[in-house]
Amino acid sequence: MADFIRETKNGVLIDIRVVPGASKEEISYDKEYKQLRVRISRLAMRGKANKAVLRLLSKVVGDCEIVSGKTSRKKTILIKNRNAADIKQCLFIR
């Protein structure tokens, strides 16, 4: 289940799929794409969705940044100063 988490020397990389314009903001696991699905209420306009994604994720996992996919629904996020076990625990993944 945790195929989307990779540990690096700089922190942990996670693959996410963003669903902008959702009625409810939430983080869930997408079995089809083997990624986290991050639903946000903001639309993908002028970086507002990216800011909303980072705000939601940072509440759960801490300091993070988008390292690829800034203009795509599929993104890779770097979570700094954490390890994969910490992230799995934050996201309740076994």
Image: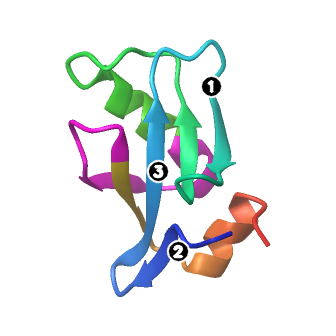
- Is 91 one of the magenta-colored residues? no
Task: Give the CA distance from mark 2 to mark 3.
Answer: 17 Å
Q: Which residue is mark 2?
A: 82
CB within 8 Å, label 3 to label 1: no
Mark 3 vs mark 1: give the one in front. 3
Asked if the residue at tag 3 contacts the one at tag 2, i.e. Cβ–Cβ closer than 8 Å, the answer is: no
> Residue at the location (43% across, 40% down)?
54
Mark closest to the chain's N terminus, 3 or 1: 3
Quadrant in the picture for the C terminus: bottom right
Callout 1: helix, strand or loop? loop
Instruction: Indicate whether 77 appears above or below 69.
Output: below
- Looking at the rendering, the stretch of residues picked out in magenta corresponds to 57-74
- First-in-chain label (1 vs 2): 1
Q: Judge whether 61 appears above or below 88 on screen.
A: above
Is residue 81 or residue 49 the one in the foreground? 49
Q: Position of residue 51 (x, y in %)?
A: 36, 31
Q: State the residue position of label 1.
A: 25
Which amino acid, by three-letter code, is at mark 2? Arg
